[in-house]
Image (cartoon, rainbow, N blue to C red):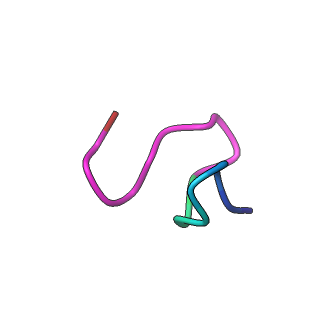
Amino acid sequence: IEDVNGRMVLLSGIDLVDGT
């Protein structure tokens, strides 16, 4: 799953890059 910025995110929507 990726967020709107194309970064990998967890199913919960937490960004794996900056931890938000």
Q: Residue furthest front?
A: 5
| Frontmost residue, 19 versus 6 | 6
Image location (x, y in percent) of residue 13 = 61, 37
Mark count: 0
- For image coordinates 25% across by 49% down, the residue present is 18
Image location (x, y in percent) of residue 20 = 34, 33
Q: Residue furthest left?
A: 18
- For image coordinates 59% across by 51% down, the residue present is 10
Residue 11 as seen in the image, left or right of residue 5: right
Residue 15 part of the magenta segment: yes
Quarter of the figure with the N terminus: bottom right
- For image coordinates 49% across by 39% down, the residue present is 14
Q: Looking at the magenta stretch, what is its main secondary structure?
A: loop
Where 4 falls versus 14 (above or below)? below
Residue 6 location, quadrant:
bottom right
Residue 2 location, quadrant:
bottom right
Residue 17 part of the magenta segment: yes
Where 1 falls versus 19 (above or below)? below
Where 16 falls versus 14 (above or below)? below
Q: Which residues are magenta?
A: 10-19
Image location (x, y in percent) of residue 5 = 56, 56
